[in-house]
Image (cartoon, grey):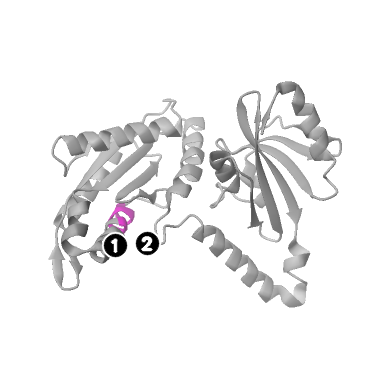
Amino acid sequence: MEMKPEELDVLISQLTASEHLYGHIRVVDPVHKRVVYQNTGHGLEPVSDLRACFELFDKKTACRNCISMRAYHENESFIKVETSPDRVHMVTAIPVEIAGRKVVVEFFKDVTNSMIMDDASFNQGVEMKRLLDQANLAAVTDELTRVYNKRYILEKLPADLTLALAEQQPFGLIVADIDHFKSVNDTYGHLAGDQILREFAAVLKDTCLDQADWTARFGGEEFVVCLPGKDRDTVLAVAERMRARIEEQVFHYDGQAITLTSSFGVYALAPGDVIDYETLLKRADQHLYQSKRTGRNRVTG
């Protein structure tokens, strides 16, 4: 939905008219995880303090399975159920373009009483919240490797990068790829290839430094490792440890011992550097392909 600037007031009045159906309405910038407008007693009004969108759910970090980022990227409307410590919300996210800037309108309906009855049903309520949290995690988890998926990259990377830029912290990204993976599939079969992908992902994840770091499968045999707060030397060292561990490891499938190598592209930001997440991914990926062009089984950064 594309709008002219003067149509914003019309949009706001239309949304405000829907308040009897929704407990909360707001307009967010999902890339930077900021609330732009939210409804008050006088309708939707600009938010001056640019609060983080996930604060509504009493969270300190961005939501896993952020449907507003999905709506933003896919230009479609989405619905999900989100939980806070004591409430359950049904959230509808609708992408809108205003003056060339894409934002997302979020509608919230409190469905706590519909899903968690009363104190007598506390255990059922806790179980419901656990199941909802599991469902949201499953939506951003790669089924084969059990690390995060591409959707998580597109949702989490912008949030982590924005925070690093705001706090002037270093930031590192690694893109990793298994060398000659097609030959592995052709020689040993696709089931062997699947097993190698699982073990490869586990090596990347286990080599990370702390809980702030995360690993995701970008697609095929290509993976992304995000290291917030890590400087260039640290990120290069982590990538080199990953490369060495893959080269040393013997992968086993159906009685067969399989060895392989991998290539890595690294891009790191120093404090004060400014870049958007798409450019960051592109530059790390360019370094990966430089590793492949110059012989594979190496780290370029």
Q: Is residue 250 visible?
A: no
- Residue 194 numbered tag: 1
Q: Nearer the viewer, residue 164 or 67?
A: 67
- Measured as percent of width and height from the top left, residue 42 is found at 86, 35
Residue that badge 2 annotates: 144
Left or right: residue 169 compared with residue 181: right
Classify 24 as above or below 203.
above
Q: Is residue 160 magenta?
A: no
Give, as a single range, the part of the protein colored magenta. 201-207
Amino acid type of the residue that numbered disc 2 sits on in the rendered structure: Leu
- Measured as percent of width and height from the top left, residue 297 is found at 16, 44
Q: Quadrant of the C terminus?
A: top left
- Measured as percent of width and height from the top left, residue 61 is found at 55, 47
Q: Quadrant of the N terminus?
A: top right
Left or right: residue 160 compared with residue 190: right
Q: Nearer the viewer, residue 287 or 127?
A: 287
